[in-house]
Image (cartoon, grey):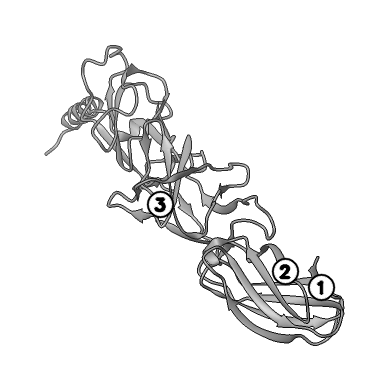
Amino acid sequence: MITFRKARNALAVALTAAAALPATADAVVVTVTGDDGNPIPFNGEVSIRNMDAKVSIAPSGGEKINFSATFVGPDGANTATPVSCLSSGTTRSMEYRGNGAYTVTVQTYGEKDFSCKTPTGGPSTYKYTVNAGVALAAPPTRVLIRAPNSFVTQPVVLPIFQNPGASTHEIRYAAGGVIGSDGAISGPSAEGFVDRTTGTVPLRLTTPGRYTVVARARSGQFFSPWSAPVFVDAVAPFDIQFARTPDARGPSYRIAVTVRELSAAGSRVRLSYARGRKGGKYRSLGSVKINSKGVFTKRFTLRRSGTYRMRFTYPGSATVAPGVIVQQFRVSRRVSFG
């Protein structure tokens, strides 16, 4: 039979033992900043993209403890200065050291243990995963490297989805670029730069072709993985440098037309003409091939003087966009364009 005295003594022993129990993980509150900059508590698996994460540690409300802490990246190296011994909250900026699991280990000590000599129980571990990376969006159709009748190249603008917390982003592109095993472009490539205001990457493509573009985010000395490559099909416009008349005496005339884009060589242009400044039916003159110098020539016969229009129709190629050019010319005793 249990007497009142025995019960009282057992309760006293239980309370003494409870007082001696080590502090638990609930003794501190640990958070990490998410992609939006707000703190995330460790209530299960935590995954972020933020490359500039900050970890905060503080005693739980009412807890009187001291604590130490270490911070380790996925490569096993320290990502922040360890906490040697503190009784109040602290925040550490975590160095990004690549994608993977980051570990925060917190050890608690007694209220009066200001040197953190005697742990109260085992350490508590908090883990979060960083999955940093960027993405590019390719144009839905082929793009022009310059406006028609212009010598100046125009930028081709790609949207980029940037990574939170990145200090910079690296963009590389190359005509006919081949992706290596590390996700980068093998061989020489040009560098692009992010316009942070617009969230785009302007590329300067000087020649027609298929361009490969990749990007990655950087924080300190470490980079995220390269993005999946996107491809930009760049073409030149169909335009003419000048048209001349090597044989301008009629009624049989010969014209020579020089196109601006030499890669159009080998393809064909359809020619037709109509009488007057506007209106009237076009009559076909057939098609001619553009030679290696970017020139095509055509002989035709006109027996009536007056104003005419010559139409050049280009169906397009791998490097030059389709286009139609109409030029006015006048026939008297001679033919003259312009």
> Residue shown at 30%/52% (left/top)?
180
Q: Which residue is mark 2?
A: 245
Q: Residues within 10 Å of mark 3 (few under 14, many from 20)?
A: some
Check disc 1 and report the residue beneath it.
Answer: 334
- In the image: residue 202, left or right of residue 165: right
Q: In the image, what residue occupies the spot 15% across and 30% down?
A: 6
Q: SS class of the residue under badge 2?
A: strand
The residue identified by callout 3 is: 227
Q: Residue at x 45, y 58 (%)?
A: 230
**Residues at marks 1 and 3, CA–CA distance in whole angstroms:** 61 Å
Q: Amino acid at mark 3?
A: Ser
Q: Amino acid at mark 1?
A: Arg
Amino acid on which the number 2 mark rests in the picture:
Thr
The residue closer to the viewer here, 271 or 19, is 271
Local SS, label 1: loop
Number of numbered discs: 3
Q: Position of residue 182 (x, y in %)?
A: 29, 49
Chain-order first, disc 2 or disc 1: 2
Query: Does residue 309 appear left or right of residue 168 in this picture?
Result: right
For the C terminus, the image quarter is: bottom right
Which badge, 3 or 2, comes first in the chain's sequence?
A: 3
Query: Residue at position x 50%, y 46% from top?
Result: 162
